[in-house]
Image (tube, rainbow, N blue to C red):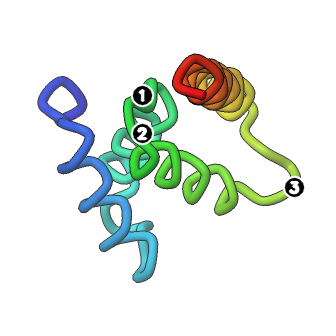
């Protein structure tokens, strides 16, 4: 399924199974989560979802480094917003 995820389908699957027991569908759950963390946010809503997934990781984070790369992409997104606001002002 990972090759067929869209941001919306990955988020929907992740949210439905994160609130339940993801163990039964662990491979798909992990795939959806990875897809979300690998996504570059293009809107505030997408950025919020990435933050939501990151917060669920807990203080230990991930061993594969996806959390750090996701934070770097969020930083880039926020800087872009800041620059756009500065230009608009």
Label 1 – label 3 distance at C-alpha = 21 Å
| Residue 42 rendering spot, x and y as whole percentages | 38, 30
| Residue 76 rendering spot, x and y as whole percentages | 64, 19
Residue assigned mark 1: 39
* Outermost bottom residue: 20
Label 1 – label 2 distance at C-alpha = 5 Å
Label 2 – label 3 distance at C-alpha = 19 Å
| Residue 27 rendering spot, x and y as whole percentages | 36, 46
Residue assigned mark 3: 59
On screen, residue 31 versus residue 59, left or right, reads left
Q: Is residue 4 visible?
A: yes
Name the residue at 65% across, 50% down. 54
Residue assigned mark 2: 36
The disc, 1 or 3, on the residue closer to the chain's N-terminal end is 1
What is the quadrant of residue 69 in the picture?
top right
Give the quarter of the figure containing the N terminus: top left
* Outermost left residue: 4
Q: Between label 1 and label 3, give the one nearer the viewer.
A: 1
Name the residue at 72% across, 39% down. 62
- Under tag 3, what secondary structure? loop
The disc, 2 or 3, on the residue closer to the chain's N-terminal end is 2
Along the viewing direction, whichever of 61 and 51 lies nearer the viewer: 51
- Under tag 1, what secondary structure? loop
Along the viewing direction, whichever of 33 and 80 lies nearer the viewer: 80
| Residue 10 rendering spot, x and y as whole percentages | 27, 48
On screen, residue 5 versus residue 31, left or right, reads left
| Relative to 60, residue 73 above or below | above
- Under tag 2, what secondary structure? helix
| Relative to 27, residue 5 above or below | above
**Do callouts 1 and 2 mark residues in contact (Cβ within 8 Å)?**
yes
Name the residue at 37% across, 53% down. 29
On screen, residue 44 versus residue 56, left or right, reads left
């Amino acid at each position: 399924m990972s090759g067929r995820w869209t941001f919306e389908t990955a988020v929907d699957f992740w949210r439905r199974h994160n609130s339940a027991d993801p163990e039964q569908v662990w491979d798909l759950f992990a795939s959806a989560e990875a897809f979300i963390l690998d996504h570059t946010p293009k809107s505030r809503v997408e950025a919020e979802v990435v933050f939501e997934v990151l917060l669920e990781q807990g203080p230990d984070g991930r061993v594969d480094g996806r959390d750090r790369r996701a934070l770097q992409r969020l930083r880039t997104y926020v800087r872009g917003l800041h620059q756009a606001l500065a230009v608009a002002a």
